[in-house]
């Protein structure tokens, strides 16, 4: 099962939710897909979805997932990494009104550089990323503190650069 999560940000992330819907509809993706769609305005027609969930439901879904697809929000990545599952990260982009800036691209690049995730910068490459992660002996952190540490160090480095 693939669990997709867009977090709780007030912006939509239709681009990811729509691409998953197309992949399922066109039978290019045969896995069961469940998505937390948050504030998306696009409603999937071809897979299970919900807007928000309590911690118990979300915990069960994360435990059941074979792959997690997430935006590059720090909270979602830290939560997802607690389950030791392969994570595909699709950063939200400002140009699509998915966020106020492109900091999620920077977070995704840093985690990708350290081989903690597979990043997708263009949703048209999502299916390739899913295939890639299924075929890799992908090593994901077994504890959230690895990704948490990377994100924290990265944010601190940005703050230091801004002070100069």
Image (cartoon, rainbow, N blue to C red):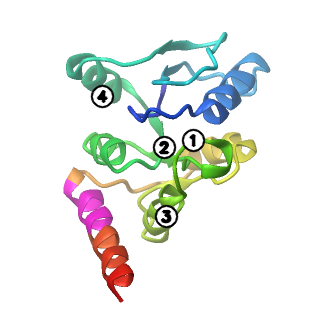
Residue position for label 1: 98
Residue position for label 3: 112
- Describe the element under mark 2 as helix, strand or loop: loop
Magenta stretch, residue numbers:
145-152
**Residue at left 30%, top 23%?**
58
Residues at circles 1 and 4 in contact by the CB criterion of under 8 Å: no
Q: Is residue 103 left or right of residue 154?
A: right
- Describe the element under mark 4 as helix, strand or loop: helix
Mark 2, residues whose alpha carbon is within 10 Å: few (<14), some, or many (≥20)?
Answer: many
Q: CA distance from mark 1 to mark 4?
A: 27 Å
- Nearest to the observer: residue 140 or residue 41: 41
- Describe the element under mark 3 as helix, strand or loop: helix
**Residue at left 65%, top 22%?**
30
Q: Is residue 146 magenta?
A: yes
Of labels 2 and 4, earlier in sequence is 4
Residue at the outermost right position: 26
Q: Is residue 59 left or right of residue 129?
A: left
State which mark lies toward you, 2 or 3.
2
Residue 105 in the image: x percent, y percent? 54, 60
């Amino acid at each position: 099962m693939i669990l997709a999560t867009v977090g709780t940000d007030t912006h939509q992330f239709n681009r990811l939710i729509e691409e998953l819907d197309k992949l399922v509809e066109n039978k290019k993706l045969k896995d069961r897909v469940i998505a937390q769609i948050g504030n998306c305005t696009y409603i999937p027609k071809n897979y299970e979805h919900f807007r928000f969930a309590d911690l118990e439901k979300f915990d069960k879904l994360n435990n059941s997932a074979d792959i997690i697809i997430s935006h590059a929000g720090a909270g979602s990545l830290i939560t997802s990494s607690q389950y030791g599952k392969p994570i595909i990260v699709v950063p939200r982009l400002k140009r699509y009104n998915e966020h106020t800036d492109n900091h999620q691209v920077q977070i995704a690049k840093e985690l990708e550089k350290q081989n903690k995730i597979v990043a997708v910068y263009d949703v048209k490459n999502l299916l390739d990323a899913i295939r890639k992660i299924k075929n890799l002996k992908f090593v994901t952190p077994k504890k959230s503190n690895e990704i948490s540490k990377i994100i924290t160090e990265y944010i601190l480095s940005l703050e230091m650069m801004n002070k100069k």
